[in-house]
Image (cartoon, grey):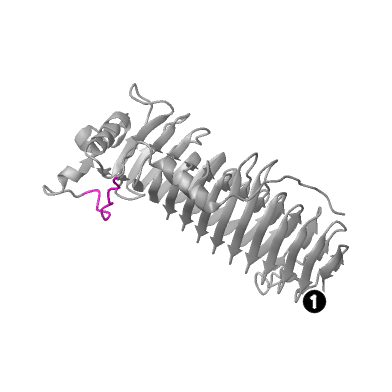
Amino acid sequence: MFEHDYKSSRELMDRRSLLRSAMAATTVGVGTAILSRPEPVSAQTTTATTAGYFFNVKDYGATGNGSTSDTDAIQAAIDAAIAVGGGIVLFPAGSYLITSTAHTTGTTRLRINNAASVALQGAGIEATYLVVPTGASQDTITITGSIGSSVKMLSIYSGTDVTSGRSIFLDACFDIVIEEVAMYRQNFCVELNGGSLIKINKCHLEMSANGVGVRVYGGAVDTMLSQTFTKSGLYAHQFADCGGFFIDSCDSINAQYGLVINPTGTQTVLWGMICNSSWDTCTYDCIHIVPGTGGFASGINFSNCWSSSSIGGGCCVVAGNVDGCEFVGHRFFGAAVGNGLWVSGPARNILADSSIAAGIVNGYGFVFVGGATSFAVRNCFSGKYAAVSASSPSAPNKYGIGVDTSCSKYMLVNNILASNTTSALVDSGVAPKLTAPNLVT
C-alpha cells in the first residue's frame, strides 16, 4: 500500500557562521565603503544638477530601436557609472537588442563586476525592453562581487523560448534589489550563487519548458522573494543550498514542479519562512522537499499557503533527510494521482495544523510512510470540502489520513475526516502515538 524510502544524513549548520562566511565572500574586491542608493527616479528625466550621477544609455550610443545591437553602448554606460563609484544607468523607453559582440566577456553580455551602487533602471516593464535574440546562450546580465546594486523597471524578452543561459545572474553579491522586472520566454530567470540580502520584488517571470524562475544555491543567506508571479518552466522556485530565505505573497502556475527544495552532497537548505503564496496547476509536485544523497533541509515553515491541482504528482512531498517542516493554515487541494501531504522517512518533526486536504480522489489527504517519526496532524480537515460553486461540489478524498507500519512517535488529533470514499483513518503505526479524538463523518 505504501511505497518509497529516502535515506541521507547531514548535520545542521550554524546560521551565524554561514552568514559571516557569505558576507565576507561578497566584499572581496568591492572595498569597505558602501554607497547609499538614491530614491528611484524617472528614466525620462535628468537635470544639469544630477547629470553626473545618471548615465543615459542613449548618450553612449544606444538606439533602442530593437534591430541595432545596443550591447556595447549599454556596457559603456555601465562602465562609466562603475568608474565614478556608482550611479543610475537609465534606459529610456524603447527596445534594446542585446547580442554577443566583440566586447562581450565570457558567458555574459552585460556585466557589473566588483562595483558598488550601480542601478540599471528602465522606464517601466511595458516601456523598456531588453530583447534577447533567438538561440541566445549567454547570460543577459551578470552582477559579480557587488554591493548595493539593482535592476528595476524593465523587461527582458525573447520572441521564442530561450533554452540556455540566465537572464540575471548574481554571483557573491550583497544587498541587491531586483524590482518590477518582467522576463518572458527565458531559461533561468534569476539565479543566485552565494551572497546575502538579495531582494526580488514585484517581478513577472515566464520560463521556457525547462527553465527555472528563481534558483538559489552556493550558501546564499537572507534571500527575499515577494509579490512575484511565475509561469511555466521546470521549477518555479528552486532552493538547493542556502540559509534564511523568505517567500511572501507569490503566485506560480503551470510549472512542472512549483517550489523545489533539493540540496544534495554537502548542501543544506535552512530556515525557510514562506507565507501567503501558492503553487497551482503543476504537472508533478506542487511542493517538493526532497534532499538528495547527503543533502539536508531543516526549519521550513509554511503559513497560509496553497499547493493545488497537481496533474501527475502530489500537492506536497516531504521525503528524506528533513528535520522540521511546518504547515499552518495550508491548503492541499486537487491531486489527480498523488496525495495531499506525503511524508517519507527519515523525515521527522513534520507538523500540519489548521490545514485542509481535499479533492485527493485517488490518494490520502495526509500520509506518512518509510519510517517517518515525530509528526503531527492536528486541527485539520481531510475529505470532501467546500464546493467550487452551488452546482459543482468538490471531490472527496479516497483516504483521510494514513500511517504505515514503519512510523512511530506521532499525534493525529482534533481532525475532521469527512466523506472519504474508502477509509477515514488507516493507522498501522506503532507506539508511542496519540490518535484520538477525531471526528469522522
Is 39 magenta? The answer is: yes
Determine the residue positioned at 67% across, 69% down. 355
In the displayed structure, 200 sits above or below 85; it is below
- The local secondary structure at tag 1 comes to loop
Residue 424 x, y percent position in the rendering? 83, 69
Task: Name the quadrant of the C terminus.
Answer: bottom right
Q: State the residue position of label 1.
A: 438
Residue 273 x, y percent position in the rendering? 55, 60
**Residue 84 placement, left or right of 108:** left
In the displayed structure, 191 sits above or below 409; it is above
Q: Nearer the viewer, residue 140 or 240?
A: 240
Residue 3 x, y percent position in the rendering? 83, 50
| Residue 39 visible in this rendered orientation of the protein | yes
Q: Which residues are magenta?
A: 33-44
**Residue 175 placement, left or right of 425:** left
Instruction: Name the residue furthest left.
Output: 48
Residue type at tag 1: Asn
Q: Nearer the viewer, residue 203 or 132?
A: 203
| Residue 281 visible in this rendered orientation of the protein | no
Magenta span: predominant SS is: loop
